[in-house]
């Protein structure tokens, strides 16, 4: 199946990153979010990130202009009906995603492939509530999308081979590498990464270390490019908590219980970089630990 037009639902940090790489690779992109302001904010981030690539001579000014011209803002889900592939990248909440698919599905072409960028929710369950479980799969990009090379491709129980191959061809065209994961909670990357982040929050909660000592320990002691708390802020603490809840519920093992301190930060609305405060406060010149 030849994919030319890609619809993206959600213009947040993942959605705008996906739109960025898709348009640079020549796909026509339709970008949707809940409001005009949210779509415009996504477009502004794409513009800024493409400009940075121009200034670093990774792309030319013409390539940037062509990429921006290939992205159309879309305010109503039915307008994504003619897309060949739709990637849902809205907030990590099952009810939100389900409502999107319910609104979208009646307007899609019969052969449109429907995918979700979910970090953890069951692909099989999301698929079963659509009219096309065989044309549904997980298309999981990593953050920041323009930089990270991996895309996890997750087959639901009903996903057919043609759908998988079409998505794999898109990953190849983007110049990224696909890893195939089975549809179990949080797939591969987050099944391993999130318990580590959660354990770092427990280490902070129990007073074993401060934010700085925990992050320095993993950077200097385990050669991680970012400390786990810095990384949690980067991902979004709401997203981290949502993934831990999916692991906890889906695998029914207490070793995945979310740290109460992580819950507390989310309750405070301190969600990390996107709200300027999380384990670090980003409102000044340099990030300052909040504990
Ligand atoms: P985000 O909060 O930055 O963006 C979510 C966007 O979805 C917001 O702009 C919001 O307005 C929009 N949205 C909410 N409801 C919507 C609706 N009904 N219709 C259209 N848009 C809607 O979150 P994010 O980090 O971009 O995460 C998005 C998805 O990507 C989640 O499923 C998350 O698990 C997944 N993901 C996140 C990361 C990460 O590191 N943050 C990595 C891989 C995958």
Image (tube, rainbow, N blue to C red):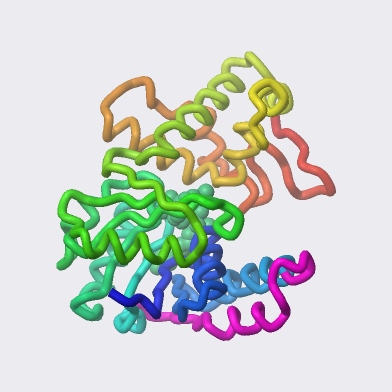
Q: Position of residue 163 (x, y in %)?
A: 25, 63
Q: Is residue 1 left or right of residue 258?
A: left
Residue 281 visible in this rendered orientation of the protein: yes
The number of callouts visible is: 0
The residue sitting at 55% across, 57% down in the picture is 145
Quarter of the image where the N terminus is located:
bottom left
Where 228 sits versus 32, above or below?
above
Q: Is residue 211 left or right of residue 118?
A: right
Whether residue 65 appears in magenta in the rendering, the answer is: yes
Q: Position of residue 78 (x, y in %)?
A: 31, 81
Q: Position of residue 222 (x, y in %)?
A: 64, 23
The residue sitting at 21% across, 59% down in the picture is 161
Q: Nearer the viewer, residue 273 or 27?
A: 27
Whether residue 120 appears in magenta in the rendering, the answer is: no
Q: Give the residues in magenta.
A: 54-77
Residue 260 visible in this rendered orientation of the protein: no
Q: Nearer the viewer, residue 150 or 79?
A: 150
């Amino acid at each position: 199946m030849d994919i030319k037009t890609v619809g993206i639902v959600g213009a947040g940090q993942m959605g705008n990153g996906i739109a960025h790489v898709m348009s640079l690779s020549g796909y026509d992109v339709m970008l949707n979010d809940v409001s005009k302001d949210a779509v415009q904010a996504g477009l502004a981030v794409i513009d800024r990130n493409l400009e940075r690539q121009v200034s670093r001579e990774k792309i030319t000014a013409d390539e940037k202009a062509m990429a921006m011209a290939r992205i159309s803002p879309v305010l109503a889900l039915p307008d994504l009906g003619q897309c060949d592939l739709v990637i849902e990248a809205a907030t990590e909440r099952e009810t939100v995603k389900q409502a999107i698919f319910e609104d979208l599905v009646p307007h899609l072409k019969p052969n449109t492939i429907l995918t979700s960028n979910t970090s953890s929710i069951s692909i099989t369950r999301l698929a079963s509530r659509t009219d096309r479980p065989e044309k549904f799969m997980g298309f999981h990009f990593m953050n920041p999308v323009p930089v990270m090379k991996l895309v996890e491709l997750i087959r639901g129980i009903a996903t057919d081979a043609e759908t998988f191959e079409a998505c794999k061809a898109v990953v190849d065209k983007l110049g990224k590498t696909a890893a195939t994961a089975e549809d179990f909670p949080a797939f591969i990357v987050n099944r391993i990464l999130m318990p580590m982040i959660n354990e770092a929050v427990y280490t902070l909660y129990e007073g074993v270390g401060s934010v700085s000592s925990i992050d320095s320990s993993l950077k200097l002691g385990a050669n991680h490019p970012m400390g786990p708390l810095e990384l949690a802020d980067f991902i979004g603490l709401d997203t981290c908590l949502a993934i831990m809840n999916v692991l906890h519920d889906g695998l029914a093992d207490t070793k995945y219980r979310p740290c109460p301190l992580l819950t507390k930060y989310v309750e405070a609305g301190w969600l990390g970089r996107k709200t300027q405060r999380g384990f670090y406060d980003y409102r000044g010149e340099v990030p300052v630990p909040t504990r």
